[in-house]
Amino acid sequence: MTAEIAPSHPKSRVLTAPDIAAAKGNDCPLVMVTAYDAPSARVVDHAGVDMILVGDTLAMVVLGYDDTLQVTTDDMAHHVGAVARTKPRALIVGDLPWMSYHVSREETVRNAAQLIRAGAGAVKLEGGRKRLEAITAILDSEIPVMGHLGLTPQSIHAIGGFKVQGKQLDAARRIVDDAVALAEAGCFAIVLECVPDGVARMVTDAISVPTIGIGAGRHCDGQVLVYHDLLGFEDRIRPRFVRRYAELGADATAAVARFVHDVRVGTFPSSDETYHMTDQLDDAMDLYAVDVTTDGQGEPAAGSRASSSGMSVTPPG
Ligand code: KIV
């Protein structure tokens, strides 16, 4: 499948953080979608996204936790690796999980490097000026960093829930100042999550690198959505900013329910979905009562379940 709409970025080679930074001000907005495994990575890359975010939303939409605080750098690297093995054209951004960049400079750099070694082309971390030391340490190790401001889900206990940020003047100013500081420090792009569109516009105008919005309105240089939200797999939280482009969760349940039904009423498998013996072999087996799990020379028959289970079925002679 190829994208029906021209990608935001015309390059045919693998996209890099500098390509994304250089797209600031382009007419065509940047697009980022999350993915956590090989099938979802193939889907979003073939759809033409510019960036694949292996987000720590992994904890919620894949692993079933209530927040993003439960994943480790090892978890994130495991999923970055799965995405990277599909060799996408899009830039892979690996999300640094909570506590992976809060303890020390050394740990921060080691954790960022683990995601790069797993196949990411950049890392993302949450927070404003108080994260500048971590950001600088990672940048000094030649690893591109994407910032994340506004609603930062790793701070959920400190901010009191998944709430829109920057609604008051002071808070709005803090977000703009944080964004300027992150861009000046060298972040190649900044995610703005759940802020009023006026705040997103101020940030977008104030910095020289792209803003990527989620629940931040249209005045951003790009947009990001979570794969399971946009495809209709996630029902526990349905934020207003999510547009669902499919109902794959409901479609998948209906499809599996049809399989359950077909097995129970005996219409699956059909004759076409079954391997049949040749008449000759049929006759020979009747004659010599050959074990159906072998090819007659003691080797397991191709496709035979018995070949993997060790089960032996000898028809009555
Ligand atoms: O982890 C994630 O999926 C994110 C997006 C919501 C931007 O950070």
Image (cartoon, rainbow, N blue to C red):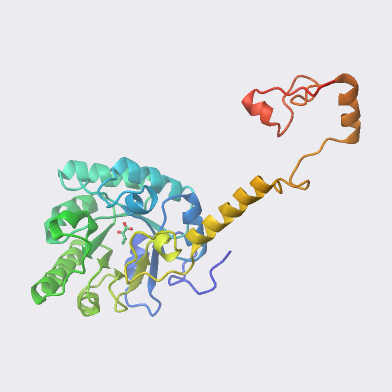
Tell me if I can see residue 119 in this picture: no
Q: Say above or below: 166 vs 304.
A: below
Tell me if 283 is positioned left or right of 16 in this view: right
> What residue is shown at x 33% (from left), y 54% (from top)?
57
Residue 94 % position (x, y): 33, 52
> What residue is shown at x 38% (from left), y 80% (from top)?
27
Quarter assignment of residue 302: top right
> What residue is shown at x 15% (from left), y 59% (from top)?
160
Foreground: 184 or 194? Answer: 194
Foreground: 92 or 227? Answer: 227
> What residue is shown at x 51% (from left), y 74% (from top)?
5
The residue lying furthest to the front in this view is 265
Residue 124 % position (x, y): 28, 56
Determine the quadrant in which ligand 1 lies. bottom left
Residue 29 % position (x, y): 38, 75
Placement of the C terminus among the 4 image quadrants: top right
Foreground: 171 or 221? Answer: 171
Placement of the N terminus among the 4 image quadrants: bottom right
Q: How many labels does the image show?
A: 0
